[in-house]
Amino acid sequence: MKCENVISATGVSFGYEKGKYIFQDVGFSLGRNEILCLFGPNGCGKTTLLDCVMGINKVAKGEIKVIDKDITRYKRDELARLAAYVPQLHNRTFPYTVRQIVMMGRSAYTGVLGSPGADDEAIALESIAHVGMERFTDTPYTKLSGGEVQLVMLARALSQQTRIIVMDEPTCHLDFKNELMFLETLVKLCKDTALSVLIATHSPDHAYYFESQGISVKVALMHEGKAERAGAPKDILTEENLKRVYGVKAKVLSYTDEDGNQRRNVSLLKTAGKGA
């Protein structure tokens, strides 16, 4: 059965100055219980596009729908109950506890000035448990590692109880172990719930990892102000496309892991000069 689209973008263009577009005529769709990986070089507009999806930027042309309704027709709190956001970076200024940070996700229901109740706290604690951070519940999050903070940000997004989570390069500052822990947690959430994820990332291995774990995943490639066709990782993240879009020579390796799963990884070889 074809996935129900929880986000769809059609003919979307955006620019901060009239007539000067960062990207034009972008289209993609995100299905229910699906991960869509958005790839593209630095400066191609991935973060800007995510801001359009979250209603922060107003598109110049085209249409973005969330759950079959134009994004411009949602009030901010209504949209916050449908789509949560996990940023690339988070400035840790005040020593809030993990519990307090995750409880902030409940403001979509209580309002900024409202007081959370017992039900809100129970949802926050459940979200913390989902990402395996129970032992840090009352720890100031300023004392956590970068990987642990990203899991807390994911828990905060979960506490919003949305059908969609939008992520902007959430693993870009993590070491190998913390990156894998984050990806494993995300896979478990997708398998246990009907969660849909739109994630901007620079790592093609993320899409291949999700695919190897049995998650429904597709890739959209942004290049020169356009979002090219979306499809399965093996069809989009090819050696030819990586060379054309990123200017690198790479090898897509295919192998069977110790559990008998078919896996793919990208091995970077060298930058590709003109005519290479």
Image (cartoon, grey):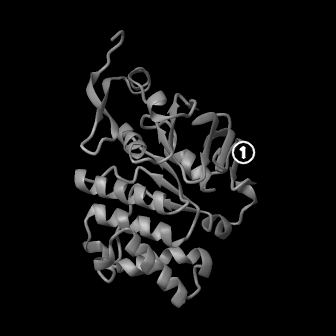
- Which quadrant of the figure has residue 160? bottom right
Query: Residue lying furthest top in this view?
Result: 275
User: Looking at the picture, does residue 158 appear above or below residue 181?
Assistant: below
Q: Is residue 157 visible?
A: yes
Tell me the element at label 1.
strand
User: Where, quadrant-wise, is the N terminus in this rendering?
Assistant: top right
**Residue shown at the point (27%, 57%) measured from the top left:** 178
Q: Residue furthest front?
A: 260
Above or below 201: residue 183: below
Name the residue carrying label 1: 63
On screen, residue 91 above or below 32: below
Amino acid carrying label 1: it is Glu
Residue 21 in view in this figure: no
- Residue at position x 52%, y 63% in the image: 193
The one of 61 and 68 positioned closer to us in this rendering: 68
125 relative to 181 in the view: left or right: right
The residue closer to the viewer here, 189 or 89, is 189
Q: Position of residue 189 (x, y in %)?
A: 45, 61
Crowd rating for badge 1 (residues with CA inside 10 Å; few <14, some 14–19, many 20+): many
- Measuring from the top left, give residue 34's x and y in whole percent: 54, 49
Residue 91, how many percent across, how many down? 37, 65
